Image (cartoon, rainbow, N blue to C red):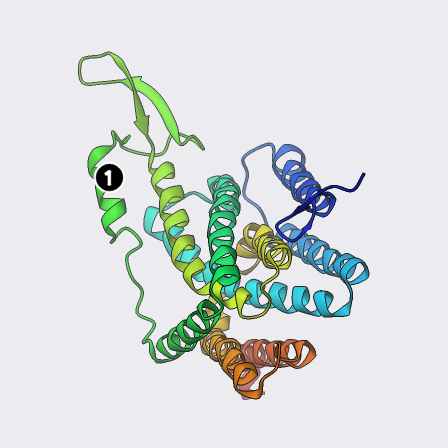
Amino acid sequence: MLLAPLMGKPLWMWLIFAGVVTLLLVLDLGVLHRKQRTIGVRESLALSAGYLSMGLGFGVWVWGELGPQAGVEYLTGFLVEKSLALDNVFVIASIFAAFAVPAAYQHRVLFWGVLGVILLRGVMIGFGAALVARFDWVLLVFAGFLVLMGAKMFLAKGEAKDPRDNVLYRWAASHLRLTDGFRGSRFVVREPGPGGRPMLFATPLLMVLVTIELADVIFAVDSVPAIFAITTDPYLVYTSNIFAILGLRALYFALGAVVDRFAYLKQALAALLVFIGGKVFVAEAMGWEKFPAPVSLGVTAALLAGGIGYSVWRTRRPAARAA
């Protein structure tokens, strides 16, 4: 008996995806990183390569199961989401620096942060899919929003903002009982209160986690419309999104020390958002059902490669430039 389709695809396809993600998370936290420790660059690069391989491998499987069109759309979405995740690295680095989080605790914060992201993105993507399915014009709204956000990103001066300077964080800090410092890698502890009675206290590490989740909600405002401008298939939207996010922790530890080398990546991401939004209007004006997926993938790859390559070239060491 065939299983009923779930969100446009059979249940077994969703179960395969959920199984792979669960296996990766269990392997990561339960096997590779059971003990709190600092993760080195070499290990981070190996983990990043592993997550990248899994994401691309899943795309090959999608290509085989659903055909070339779906495969190219998944790979384009994965590449776009992965590139937008690079911007998250800059913000996460600033959050950890603002809270002076020891390197040994950062992996645990990012692990639980990614779990929260998986749930939040699921809600936002489900809501977006329902809107697009019900109202065709919503996709044009998404596209216009991407063009505006891309232009805003390109013109932004890039001034760093204090990650604690938001209303929700200030409310939480004023309404929660906070410890006077970190308590290892714990988010909540039970300690004696004012009267000597044991009470629950939040640690600064919990506030770091909340701040990272808030930052991802802001990033998702760009990310979710971007993937819907590539494909409206909920399965491709969610799987490409999550596989790109899963490697964010390893990517942070691999690139955290050299984020300054990607000084011009933001401009490339801005151009990418404008292109993704603009191609929706082009397809609408030309009467196409969709913008050609291979062209979209090629332009996306070219913009990202150009931004990364130009950044590395402009920020290379003075000795190298003088040679």
Q: Is residue 203 left or right of residue 71?
A: left
Instruction: Please provide percent x and percent y for residue 32.
Output: 66, 38
Residue closer to the observer: 77 or 184: 77
Instruction: Please provide percent x and percent y for residue 168.
Output: 26, 46
Instruction: Please provide percent x and percent y for residue 54.
Output: 72, 54
Residue in view at x 58 percent, y 81 percent:
306
Quadrant assignment for the N terminus: top right
Residue in view at x 24 percent, y 39 percent:
173
Quadrant assignment for the C terminus: bottom right
Res 20 quadrant in image: top right
Res 182 quadrant in image: top left
Is residue 70 depicted above or below 103 in this figure?
below
Is residue 201 depicted above or below 206 in this figure?
above
Q: Which residue is mark 1?
A: 173
Q: Is residue 157 left or right of residue 81?
A: left
Total residue callouts: 1
Is residue 262 depicted above or below 17 in this figure?
below
Is residue 229 depicted above or below 310 in this figure?
above
Rate crowding at label 1 as few (under 14), some (14 to 19) or many (20 or more) other CA atoms within 10 Å: some
Q: Is residue 215 left or right of residue 108?
A: left
Residue closer to the observer: 130 or 19: 130
Residue closer to the observer: 279 or 287: 287
Residue in view at x 46 percent, y 47 percent:
120
Query: What residue type is disc 1 on?
Result: Ala
Secondary structure category for the residue under label 1:
helix
Residue closer to the observer: 49 or 239: 239
Instruction: Please provide percent x and percent y for residue 125.
Output: 51, 54
